[in-house]
Amino acid sequence: MTPPRNDRTLLPLAAGHRDGGRSAATCIWKCGDACSQPVPNTTDNEYFGDVVAASRRSVLKAGGAAAALAGMTTIAGAALTDQAAAAAPGNKAPFGFTPIDPVTAGTDEFVVPEGFQWTPIIAWGDPVLAGAPAFDFDNQTAAAQAGQMGYNCDYVGVLRNGSANAAVLVVNNEYTNNELMFHGYTDAASLTDDQVGITLNAHGMTVVEMTRKNPNSKWTYTKAAPLNRRITAETPFEFVGPVRGHDLVKTSADPAGTTPLGTFGNCAGGSTPWGTVLSGEENFNFYFTQPEAPTEDRAGEAAARYGLAGGNQAQHNWDRLDTRFDLTQEPNEANRHGWIVEVDPFDPQGAPRKLTALGRFKHEGANVTVNSDGRVVVYMGDDERFDYMYKFVSAGTWSSSDAAHNHTLLEEGDLYVAKFNGNGSADGLHDGDGQWLPLVVDGRSEVPGFTVEEVLVYTRLAADAVSPTKMDRPEDVEVNPVNGRVYAALTNNSKRTPAQVDEANPRANNKHGQVLEITPRGGDHSSADFDWKLVLICGDPSDPETYFNGYDTSQVSPISCPDNVAFDGEGNLWIATDGNALGHCDGMYLMPLEGEHKGHLQQFLSVPAFSECCGPLIEWDDRVVFAAVQHPGEDDGASTTNIKSTFPYTGNTQPRPAVVMIWPEAKGPKGDKGPKGDKGPKGDKGPRGPVVETDRV
C-alpha cells in the first residue's frame, strides 16, 4: 500500500456551477469542477458562421417582438401549421399522457403524469452477487460493495433474455460522493482504507437479470442470478484495436500494454446489434494525482488538453491503495482510460474490452447503427466545452448469422470528426451542411505528424489539427431508428462569447443548450457529407431565441440542459436533462419529430431534489419507460446529517441513486389492466410502498 500524498492540492470547492443549474457539490464530485477550470481547447480553430449567427439572432429577436405586438405567433420566421396553432395546452402527447408542470428545484418528489405509476427496480447497495449482504448504510465494507449495486447510475440498457418477460439490465455507475456516503467525511485523507475501497468498488457497471409476470406488471431484479455481475474500478479489461500493446499504454504492472484495470466515470452508452453494451468513460482525469506541470512534448501537450496536469491530488485518494493512480509514478496509466468499453452481459466470465479504434476522449457514450452497405457506424460526443463530435465506420460488415464475427466489428475501422457549416439566415432556420473530417482511414493516419496510435490515444490533439467545429458540450449522440437521422444533445456552454457563436452553437453564455439533427447525405451513414438543423433550442419558451422545431412556443414545456436522448417506436424524441438552469428539477421530455405534434415538447416526469435524470429507455409496445435517478440530494452542504432527499422513499433515511420504471397505472397496452401503485403527491403515482409525503422539501 502506498501512503497518502499530502503534498498536493485537492480540487477547490466551487462557488457555483457556471453551466446550467447543477449544485457546486455535483460539479466537484461528477467532473472535478470542470466548468470552473480553464477551457482545455485553446486552439484558434475557426468558429463557423459568425456573421450568419449574428444576423440570425437579430431575426429571432425582431421576429419575436413583432409577433408579440401583432398578436401573432411565429417561430424562427416560419409560420406555424394550422394543426400546431390549434393545439391546446395540456393536449395529450403520442405516448398518451398529459404533461406535468415543472417542479420547483429542491422539491423532493418523483412526479409522473396522471395515469402513470413508478417503482424503483434497483438502488445503490442492493445485493447483486451471491453472498452479497443486504445494504446497511452504517456498516458498509469494500467487500460488500463489490457484490452490490454501484453508486450513481447513468446509462440504462435492457436486453431481452430469451423471453418477453425476462431481461438483463445493464447500468453505468458513474461516480461517488463521499459526503453523502460516509458519516463524518471531511476530506479524502479522512477516509479509511476500506472506505477508499468502497468508492473503488462503487464505480463501474452493474449487470442484473430481471423478470416480470406479464407485459403489464413491474420488472423485478433477481439476486444472485447467473448473469449478474459487478464491473468496478479494479476489474481486468482487455485492450482491442490498434493501440493494444503500444508503448503509450504500457505500465509497470502491465508491461505488455494489453490488460488495463477498471472503468470509472462511465456516463452514457448504447447497445449493439450483436447484443453487447457500450459504455463511455468520461470524466476520468480527476481520479489521478497529477504532475505539477506538463512536460514539453506531445505527451505533455496531451496531458494539458485532457486536464491531466496541474498538481491536483486524486479526488478519492485511490493512489493510497494503488500507485497506478499517481501519474507522477505511472504517467501512462491515464492513457488506459477515456475509451469506449464493451461488455457482453450474456457472458459474465468474459473480460470487458476497451475499444481503441474509437478514439480516446471524454466519451459521453456511443451508439451503433448498421449502414446500408452492412458496415456499422458509431456516433460519439466529447463532453467538454468547445469539444467535438465523432463518427466511427467499421472496416467489416455486420452478419445476421455470425455472432463471433460481429464481436470484432469495433476493432478496426475509420475515425472522423465533424465540421459544421451554416448556410445563412434566409431560410429562417439554424441549419446548414457539414463534413466528416478524416482522422484514421484504411489503417492510415490522416493527420500529419501523428501515427495511427497517436491519433487514437491523443484524439483531441489530432482533431484539433484538422479544425473541426467547437461545440457546446456534445453529449449523447444517437440514431433515430425510424427516420435514420442522428440527434445530438448539446448541453450548454456559458463560456462561449458573442465573438464565438456560430449557426450550430447560436448563443453566447449558453446556459440551456440545444438539440442537433444530422441527416446523412443520401441516407448513407458512411458518407463524408451531411446536412444539419437545430430542432430544439432550449430555455424558457417566452424567450424569442428558443425554438421548438416550428411549434408554438406558448404551448410547450420549458426545458434546460438536454443530456441524453432516446426514441420510442414511432420515432419520437425523448430527452433527459442534467442541470436545469430555469429553477426547476431535472426531468424527461417527449418531442415528436413528425406530424401534427412536431416540436410539441412536453414534460413526462420530474426527478427529486438535486438529482439528474439519466438513461431514458422507452419500450414502446408496453408503454414502459426506464430512467436512472443520479445523485439525489446532492446539494451544497448536504451530508449524512444534513439530508436533502430520501429518494427512493422505500424506508431509507439516506438518498440512494436508483433505476426506476414508469408505466400506465390503470391500463396496459391493448386495454389490459395493469397493477396499481399508491398515489403520490398531487395525484401522481408513487412507488408501491410508503406514500410520498407532500410536505417534503
Image: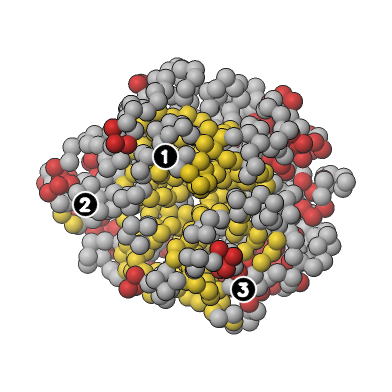
Judged by depth in the image, the label closer to the viewer, 2 or 3, is 2
Distance Cα–Cα, label 2 vs label 1: 22 Å
First reached walking from the N terminus: tag 2 or tag 3: 3
Q: What kind of element bears circle 1?
A: strand
For badge 3, the amino acid type reads Val
Q: Residue at x 63, y 77 (%)?
A: 452
Q: Residue at x 46, y 32 (%)?
A: 213
Distance Cα–Cα, label 1 vs label 3: 39 Å
Disc number for residue 625 = 1
For badge 2, the amino acid type reads Gly
Q: How many marks?
A: 3
| Residue count near mark 1 (Cα–Cα under 10 Å), binned few <14, some 14–19, many ≥20 | some
**Residue 181, placed above or below residue 249:** above
Q: What kind of element bears circle 2?
A: loop
First reached walking from the N terminus: tag 1 or tag 3: 3
As drawn, is 571 to the left or to the right of 526?
Answer: left
Residue 520 seen from this side: yes
Judged by depth in the image, the label closer to the viewer, 2 or 1, is 1
Residue 575 coordinates in the image, percent (x, y): 40, 46
Which residue is more in the foreground, 130 or 231?
130
Residue 87: name its quadrant. Answer: top left
Residue 551 seen from this side: no
Distance Cα–Cα, label 2 vs label 3: 43 Å
Residue 140 coordinates in the image, percent (x, y): 73, 29
As drawn, is 265 to the left or to the right of 583?
Answer: right
Residue indicated by mark 2: 595
Residue indicated by mark 3: 455
| Residue count near mark 3 (Cα–Cα under 10 Å), binned few <14, some 14–19, many ≥20 | many
